[in-house]
Image: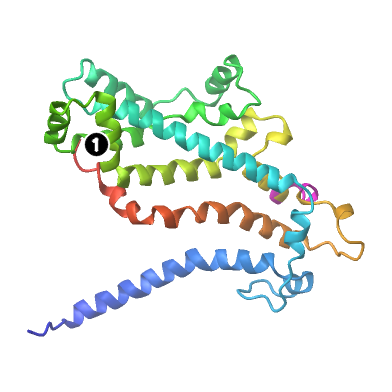
């Protein structure tokens, strides 16, 4: 087997790439490690050490405090409900609209596509959207967090392009076998669309999980706040909503405010991170599929 020789400039370029990517990865990972470590640190250590990656003494006081009441768990339940139902609604409307638009023979197809593209460039804005939500009596309901963003125009176009790239022979063979349009979508198209569906499932789910602005606008009842709104209240306003000292052991010492903030951030971040490994094998392929042809 012939040996491959690298030039000096090529080796230097690779080394520079490794250094740059390593620094970039460290800049992204180290702050998150600090957040996790700080959530387990004691008051004395947080006061003494400005930045650290491994706490000298591990303490679960911050987590005991924030889980001393049902406030955090209730907010997590609200966020999970909105994320799961919202993602299903997003996928349903995206797929059912993208599938017919992928048919070039559809009457009025170009007009509808132009309207979709128009919505990407121009939007009604916050106040008109709020007025629409109010007139539909969706205020203080979870549907106010789901329905206004039921379809992403950009994601719709990507999924539509993916459907267009499927071999037309599959459709013809299925119709010869007596398959209906719904059967074709359910039995043929969707099973072949796992990469793109997995990708946009992750995109939609992350969007719902991290969204707090819609809840600030439409949800007035604190009992219905998702986790991100509660996290905002704790981090920016006060730590009082995080737990209840009266529910703790008499000898319990309230953890430092900074540790409570970091613990709440960890609780708000980890659940959505656990979703990614299940979709990882489809993610890289799904990001590129459907984005080449129009």
Q: Quadrant of residue 96?
A: top left
Prevalent SS, magenta region: helix
Q: Residue at label 1? A: 188
Q: Position of residue 56 (x, y in %)?
A: 70, 79
**Residue at (43%, 25%) from the top-left corner?**
123
Q: Nearer the viewer, residue 234 or 17?
A: 234
Residue 237 on the magenta span: yes
- The quarter in which the N terminus is drawn is bottom left
Tell me how many marks there are: 1
**Residue at (26%, 75%) from the top-left corner?**
14
Residue 214 higher or lower than 15, as above or below: above
Horizontal side, residue 214 vs residue 90: left or right: right
Q: Nearer the viewer, residue 40 or 53?
A: 40
Q: What is the magenta range?
A: 235-241
Q: Nearer the viewer, residue 135 or 142?
A: 142
**Residue at (87%, 64%) from the top-left corner?**
252
Mark 1, residues whose alpha carbon is within 10 Å: few (<14), some, or many (≥20)? some
**Residue at (60%, 41%) from the top-left corner?**
79
Q: Position of residue 173 (x, y in %)?
A: 13, 32
Q: Quadrant of residue 180?
A: top left
Q: Position of residue 144 (x, y in %)?
A: 57, 27
Q: Position of residue 254 (x, y in %)?
A: 83, 61
Residue 186 on the magenta span: no
Horizontal side, residue 147 vs residue 157: left or right: right
């Amino acid at each position: 087997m012939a040996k491959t020789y690298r030039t000096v400039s090529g080796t230097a370029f690779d080394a520079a790439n490794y250094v740059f990517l390593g620094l970039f990865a460290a800049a992204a990972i180290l702050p998150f490690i600090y957040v996790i470590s700080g959530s387990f640190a004691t008051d004395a250590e947080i006061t003494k050490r400005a930045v650290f990656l491994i706490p000298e003494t591990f303490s679960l006081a911050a987590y005991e405090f924030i889980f001393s009441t049902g406030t955090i768990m209730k907010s997590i339940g609200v966020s999970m409900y909105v994320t799961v139902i919202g993602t299903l609604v997003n996928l349903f409307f995206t797929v059912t609209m993208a599938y017919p638009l992928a048919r070039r023979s559809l009457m009025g197809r170009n007009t509808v596509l132009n309207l979709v593209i128009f919505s990407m460039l121009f939007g009604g804005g916050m106040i008109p959207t709020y007025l629409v939500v109010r007139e539909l009596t969706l205020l203080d309901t979870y549907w106010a967090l789901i329905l206004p963003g039921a379809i992403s125009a950009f994601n719709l176009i990507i999924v539509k392009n993916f459907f267009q790239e499927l071999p037309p022979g599959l459709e013809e063979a299925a119709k010869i076998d007596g398959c209906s349009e719904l059967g074709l979508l359910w039995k043929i198209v969707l099973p072949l669309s796992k990469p793109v569906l997995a990708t946009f499932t992750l995109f939609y789910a992350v969007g719902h999980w991290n969204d707090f602005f819609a809840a600030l606008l439409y949800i007035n009842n604190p009992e219905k706040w998702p986790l991100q709104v509660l996290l905002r209240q704790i981090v920016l306003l006060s730590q009082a909503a995080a737990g209840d000292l009266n529910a703790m052991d008499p000898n319990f010492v309230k953890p430092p405010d900074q540790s409570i903030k970091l613990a709440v951030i960890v609780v708000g971040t980890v659940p959505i991170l656990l979703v990614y490994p299940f979709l990882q094998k489809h993610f890289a392929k799904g990001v590129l599929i459907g984005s080449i042809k129009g």
